[in-house]
Amino acid sequence: MASGPLKRQILSFAIVGTIGFVVNALGLKIATLIVSPIPAQIFAFPLAVTATWWLNRYFTFASQRPWRSEWLRYISANVLGWLVMNGIYVALVLSNAYVHEHPVIALAIASLAGMGLNFASSKWIVFRQRGSVSKIDQNRT
């Protein structure tokens, strides 16, 4: 069972992930006005991953590291989650005509699949700092 601070981080990460999903879905919706769903996700995903990095940096993990190197580290550490998420997205879009017409369905399913991997890599690779306390934990004291 997760401890209190870990539970709060998981909850914060899930909230940030939900915001990232909305950013991704809006980017996807706009991009599908111009291109098909798969290239649209190539445009939309970087917007979402940057939004989630910034929000997790500030709210979930309270990072004080230089932002440029940390952003690159976040992208690099979340590659496995990205591959899982976008692999599922592409498979769903290509395998179902209804999902192809409504790619946000595939995005929702894929986002849930990648979230656990991304939390683990974010917590233990990107934002790992000994003795750091998240903004959520600071507000509770």
Image (cartoon, grey):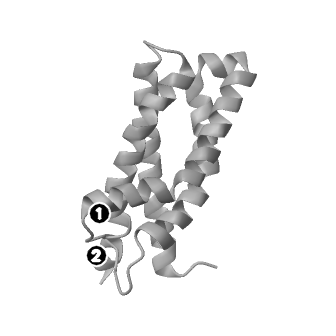
Q: Quadrant of residue 85?
A: top right
Q: Is residue 134 left or right of residue 85?
A: left
Q: Residue at x 38, y 85 (%)?
A: 130
Find residue 108 and report its horizontal and vertical position in percent. Answer: 58, 38
Q: Is residue 94 left or right of residue 83?
A: right
Instruction: Please report whichever mark, 1 or 2, sits nearer to the chain's N-terminal start.
Output: 1
The amino acid pointed to by label 1 is Tyr
Instruction: Return the residue found at the far right.
Output: 95
Report how far apart the C-alphas of labels 1 and 2 lie in the structure. Answer: 13 Å
The residue that label 2 is drawn on is 139
Residue 18 versus residue 122: which sits nearer the camera? 122
Find residue 37 and report its horizontal and vertical position in percent. Answer: 55, 21
The amino acid pointed to by label 2 is Asn
Figure quadrant of the N terminus: bottom right
- Name the element at disc 2: helix
Task: Look at the picture and state if 82 lies above or below 89.
Answer: below
Instruction: Return the residue found at the far bottom.
Output: 131
Task: Look at the picture and state if 112 lies above or below 69.
Answer: above
Disc 2 crowd, CA 10 A, few/some/many (<14, 14-19, 20+): few
The residue that label 1 is drawn on is 58
Figure quadrant of the C terminus: bottom left
